[in-house]
Image (cartoon, rainbow, N blue to C red):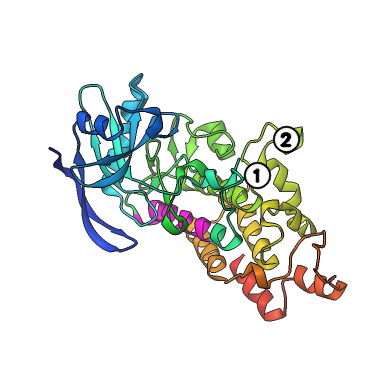
Amino acid sequence: KSKTDSLSSGETSNRGGSEHIAAQTFPFRELAMATKNFSSECLLGEGGFGRVYKGRLESINQIVAIKQLDRNGLQGNREFLVEVLMLSLLHHPNLVNLTGYCADGDQRLLVYEYMPLGSLEDHLHDISPSKKRLDWSTRMKIAAGAAKGLEYLHDKASPPVIYRDLKCSNILLAEGYFPKLSDFGLAKLGPVGDNTHVSTRVMGTYGYCAPEYAMTGQLTVKSDVYSFGVVLLEIITGRKAIDNSKAAGEQNLVAWARPLFKDRKMFSQMADPMLQGQYPPRGLFQALAVAAMCVQEQPNMRPLIADVVTALTYLASQKFKPDTQPIQGSRLMPGTPPRTKRDRDKKLNGGNSSERDRTRRLS
C-alpha cells in the first residue's frame, strides 16, 4: 500500500485550479506490475539516466510515466535525490508533477503524471507522416509556456533554480499541447548573496550549453536563457540543435543562424519548411529577434527570462488563421496572387508606424 511522504507534501496549481498534492512512495512490486515487469511494449523512451515506462497504478487509479534510473554509478542516485527534492518543493503549471517515487533496495524510480503527447522533440524532428505538424500558433504557445516554467525557476523559486538541461526532449506536452518542463536531475540552486554564479562540473547536452558554461563551468540563470534560445530556434526553424547529417557549416544550429540574423531578408528562409509559409511575417521577425538575443555570446547581453516571457506571451496571443492568410516565402504557391514591391516592403518593415512602434517595444 502506498503511503504519503511528509517531506514532499505541498500546494500546487495545475490547469484545472489549485489542489493539494503529496508525492507518495510506491513499492517496487507495484511499479513492476504496472509496467508488465518493465516490458518493452510499455517503454516510452530512454535518456541519459534511465528508461521511462507507461503504466497504470491501481492504488491511485491513474496512468503514469515511471522513470527507472540506471543503478550503475553515483550520478543516478544523486539525480534521483535532486529530482525528488526539486519537484516536491517546486510547483507550477508549466513544470511536470511528481506523483511519487520508489527507493526499494538499490532500485530508484520516479513516478510522474503521464504526458499523452510526448515531448516537443517528437513533434519537431523525424516526424512520422501520420503525425500532425505543429502550426505557428501552437509553436508560439509552447515556447511561451516553456519560458513561463523557466521564469518560475529563476524568479519565483527562492533561492533561484538553474535548470541546466533545457532541450526539446525535456519539454513534455499535455493535452492541447500544454508544455511542461521535466527532468530536474541536473538542476542546481542558483547563486545567493553577492555571488554572481555557481561553479560546477559541466553537465547538460551538447548544442544547448551556453559557451561560457561549457568553457569555465560557471553557471548562471543566463546559461538557461541561452539554452532556451536554442530551443526557440528549433521551434521556429524545425532544425535540430546539432545535426551531423547536414553540411559542415550547418551542423550547429546557432552557428548556422548567427549570420542569417544580420539580414532580415533571410528571415523567411529560416522558417521551418513544414510550416509551408503559413506564419505571420512580423511574428516570425519578432520570434527570431528574441531567439537571437537569447543566444548572444556574452551572458550579460542576453535578456532576462521575464522579458522573454513578455515577448512570447504577446506573440502567442496573436491570432493567426493559416487558411485566411497569404502564404509567405520566396516561392509563390499555386493560386497565390503576386505581391507588389510596395506590399513586400511594407511587410518587411513591420507594417504601419503604430505596429512598428509596438514591435520595437517588444523586441
Q: Quadrant of the C terminus?
A: bottom right
> Which label was assigned to residue 239?
1
Q: Where's residue 245, x and y in %?
A: 70, 32
Q: Please identify the quarter of the rendering in which residue 239 is found.
A: top right
| Viewer-proximal residue among 25 and 313 | 25
| Viewer-proximal residue among 263 and 248 | 248
Q: Residue furthest top?
A: 72
| Viewer-proximal residue among 68 and 116 | 116
Q: In the image, is 327 to the left or to the right of 10?
A: right
Q: Give the mark nearest the N terminus, 1 or 2.
A: 1
Identify residue for label 2: 246
Q: Is residue 134 above or below residue 187?
A: below
| Viewer-proximal residue among 209 and 269 | 269
Three-letter residue code for mark 1: Arg
Q: Is residue 295 above or below residue 26?
A: below
Which portion, as a residue range, is magenta? 141-156
Q: Residue furthest right?
A: 341
- Identify the residue at image location x=46%, y=42%: 170
Q: CA distance from mark 1 to mark 2?
A: 10 Å
Three-letter residue code for mark 2: Lys
Q: In the image, is 229 to the left or to the right of 350?
A: left
Decide: few, some or many residues near mark 1? Use Cα within 10 Å; few <14, some 14-19, many ≥20.
Answer: many
Is 138 a magenta residue? no
Q: Is residue 342 visible?
A: yes
Is 146 a magenta residue? yes
- Identify the residue at image location x=55%, y=56%: 303
Q: Quadrant of the N terminus?
A: top left
Query: Is the magenta region chiefly helix, strand or loop?
Result: helix
Q: Is residue 259 above or below residue 165?
A: below
Label 2 secondary element: loop
Q: Where's residue 249, x and y in %?
A: 75, 36
